[in-house]
Image (cartoon, rainbow, N blue to C red):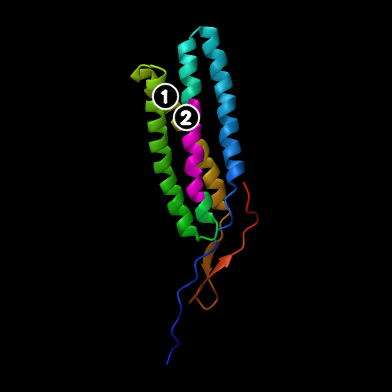
Amino acid sequence: MPSPTLPPAPCPAPPFPTLRAAGILGGLTVMVVGFTAAVLLVLGSRQQLAAAVALAGGCLLAAVASLLPVHFASRGGDIGRVAMAALGGTVIRLGGSLGLAAGIGWLLALSSRTTAAWTLAWYLLLMAAEAAVLIRYFKTLPTTTATQSGDHAQPVPTAAHSL
């Protein structure tokens, strides 16, 4: 009589380096805001400069907030929970960016076209940077492979668990 096999245990995820990821997003934002500010000052568009800087801050705040579900899911969670938390983070980033953009646009009395253009620019830039950070993190996660007997999956150690 064959013995019953147990399902494989979930692979634990290493802690997500949230502060380092937020530093990367913040550093990128500061560099691009500096370049954008220089261009807008040369062009003499102070209202566009105010809109660009304010909306960059709002989108950065939403991007950093979207990393928090991954941070908490990686603490004692398995890889599946971390992946779902990253997906949930995109919803937080989208809602936060749009909500903060609407508030900033209303407070600064910006036109809807200006608000939409700067929000879209900052949202896409920070989404690409956050995707790069998450891809580097997910590449460090352990993978599962079948053992010699083929009936259980075992985690395979990886080289590094940092960005």
10 Å crowding of disc 1: few (<14), some (14-19), many (20+) = some
Q: Residue furthest bottom?
A: 1
Does the segment drawn in magenta span residue 62? yes
At a point 59% along the width and 25% down the height, the residue shown is 31
Name the one closer to the observer, 144 or 29: 29
Q: Residue furthest left?
A: 112
Please provide percent x and percent y for residue 35: 57, 19
Does the segment drawn in magenta span residue 59? yes
Q: Identify the element where label 2 is drawn.
A: helix
Q: Residue furthest right?
A: 159
Q: Which residue is mark 2?
A: 58
Please provide percent x and percent y for residue 63: 48, 37
Image quadrant holding the N terminus, namely bottom left
Name the one closer to the observer, 92 or 156: 92
Residue 18, image quadrant = top right
Q: Are marks 1 and 2 in contact (CB under 8 Å)?
A: yes
Give me the C-alpha separation between circle 1 and circle 2.
Answer: 8 Å
| Type of the residue with mark 2 | Gly
10 Å crowding of disc 2: few (<14), some (14-19), many (20+) = many
At a point 45% along the width and 87% down the height, the residue shown is 3
Q: Which residue is mark 1?
A: 104
Please provide percent x and percent y for residue 85: 45, 51
Residue 93, image quadrant = top left
Region in magenta: 56-70
Left or right relative to 41: residue 85: left
| Type of the residue with mark 1 | Ile
Helix, strand or loop: magenta stretch: helix
At a point 49% along the width and 26% down the height, the residue shown is 56
Above or below residue 57? Residue 93 is below
